Image: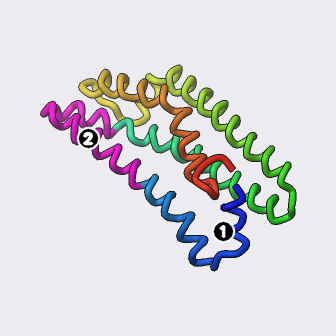
Amino acid sequence: MNDTMNLFEKAPVPQAVLKNALPAMAAMLMVLIYNLADTFFISQTHSDILVAAVSLATPVFLIFMAVGTVFGIGGTSVISRAFGQGRAEYAKKVCSFCMWGCVAVGIAMSAAFLIFMEQILALIGASADTWEPAKTYLSIVALGGPFVLISNLFQHSPSGGPA
């Protein structure tokens, strides 16, 4: 934590931005690689239906990522301003709220996706052929949702971890 504060207080702006931007870019690259790996390995089955099911589930996965990003970017903004004002205890409370808020919202979103799975499948355009594989994949994505939110939360914190 002190290293991060020293970086923002004493380092030149370009160096501070670069040191914080590189881990975020690496995390985004890992998400891309994760999605490519999913598609690659599923394509090895030579089943267009399974590849289509994964493609249908991608927007749901991106919703989890977006909500985690909201907590990460919003929390980082509030935490940074609090540190700038010398309010370290308030910054810690905001960090805690963001973490536990992600857990609660992630669980609620996962439950909602599982409960409304049929409607979501219809909304994203699953056909009779892709319905069951998409449902299976979406169930797995939904169960991992809270972890995706937390990952995206920490991806946006100043040190790449809890503030």
Q: Quadrant of residue 106?
A: top right
On the rendered structure, is 28 left or right of 154? Answer: left
Residue type at mark 2: give it.
Answer: Thr
Crowd rating for badge 1 (residues with CA inside 10 Å; few <14, some 14–19, many 20+):
some
On the rendered structure, is 101 left or right of 42? Answer: right
Check disc 1 and report the residue beneath it: 7
Residue 50 belongs to magenta span:
yes
Task: Tell us which disc is closer to us: 2 or 1.
Answer: 1
Check disc 2 and report the residue beneath it: 39
Residue type at mark 1: give it.
Answer: Leu
Q: Kindly check if marks 2 and 1 are in contact, taking CB atoms under 8 A apart as contact.
A: no
Q: Quadrant of the N terminus?
A: bottom right
Identify which residue, 29 or 53, lies in the foreground. 29
Where is residue 26 shown, x and y percent of the image?
44, 57
Number of the label disc, if any, that sits on residue 58: none
Q: In percent of the image, x 30 and y 33: which residue is there?
A: 53
Residue at the limit of the structure toward the left, as seen here: 46
Q: Secondary structure at mark 2?
A: helix
Q: Quadrant of residue 96?
A: top right
